[in-house]
Image (tube, grey):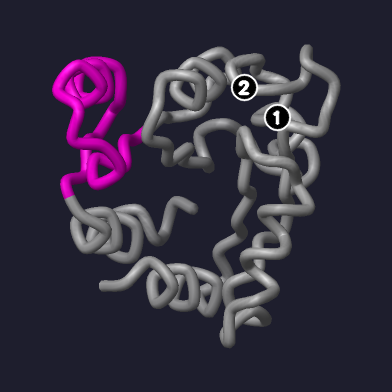
Amino acid sequence: MPPVRLLKEYRARGGRVAVVSHSPAHVIQRHYEAHPWAEQIRPDLVLGWDKDPAKRKPSPWPALHALQYFGVQPAEVLALDDLSPGVKMAKAAGVTAVAAGWGHTVQPIQDYMRRECAQYFETVQDFADYLLTSRASAL
């Protein structure tokens, strides 16, 4: 399943999406706005590198802010990331971290993500199957 289709399906089911990035928020928003399905895939919250350094990954602040913004508890959320700063942020906020294994082919990064994340997804389809079936009622 292409990532855009996964986002569209997840959002259609009532899922909410926050993007926490090392890129500036306006750059992330511009990428989503340029997509033909922008209305269906646009994140509900974008937190970028343009925040105070104390409020960037790996600080727990972005995840804690997202929890407050959405009015949810850590157990209701998944943090999908492909690098250690996102995993550290999620864990520090009490959020389950899962790995986007398709993001890197560098063995030490893969090893870290397999070791530190609750789940390691090789492909977007693997993540989609997990998110849209087994986790759908919990998110």
Q: What separation in Å lies between label 2 and label 1 (alpha carbons)?
A: 7 Å
Span of residues in magenta: 98-122
Horizontal arrangement in the rendering, residue 108 relative to residue 98 (left or right): left
On whether residue 113 falls in the magenta region, the answer is yes
- Residue 71 place in picture, x, y as percent: 75, 44
Q: Residue drawn 72% across and 60% down?
A: 29
Q: Is residue 94 above or below residue 4?
A: above
**Tag 1: Cα neighbours inside 10 Å, few (<14), some, or many (≥20)?**
many
Q: Residue drawn 19% across and 56% down?
A: 126
Label 1 secondary element: helix
- Residue 45 place in picture, x, y as percent: 73, 52
Label 2 secondary element: loop
Horizontal arrangement in the rendering, residue 31 relative to residue 6 (left or right): right
Instruction: Say what amino acid the circle numbered 1 marks.
Output: Pro
Horizontal arrangement in the rendering, residue 62 relative to residue 10 (left or right): right
- Residue 102 place in picture, x, y as percent: 24, 46
Question: Which residue ends up furthest to the right in the rendered image?
Answer: 52
Q: Which residue is mark 2?
A: 57
**Tag 2: Cα neighbours inside 10 Å, few (<14), some, or many (≥20)?**
many
Q: Is residue 15 above or below residue 23?
A: below
Name which of mark 2 and mark 1 comes first in the sequence: 2
Q: Quadrant of the N terminus?
A: bottom left
Identify which residue, 51 or 74, lies in the foreground: 51
Q: Is residue 6 above or below residue 81?
A: below
Identify which residue, 45 or 131, lies in the foreground: 45
Q: Is residue 103 above or below residue 119?
A: below
Q: Which mark is residue 62?
A: 1
- Residue 134 place in picture, x, y as percent: 27, 56
Instruction: Say what amino acid the circle numbered 2 marks.
Output: Lys
Q: Nearer the viewer, mark 2 or mark 1?
A: 2
Q: Are marks 2 and 1 in contact (CB under 8 Å)?
A: yes
On whether residue 8 falls in the magenta region, the answer is no
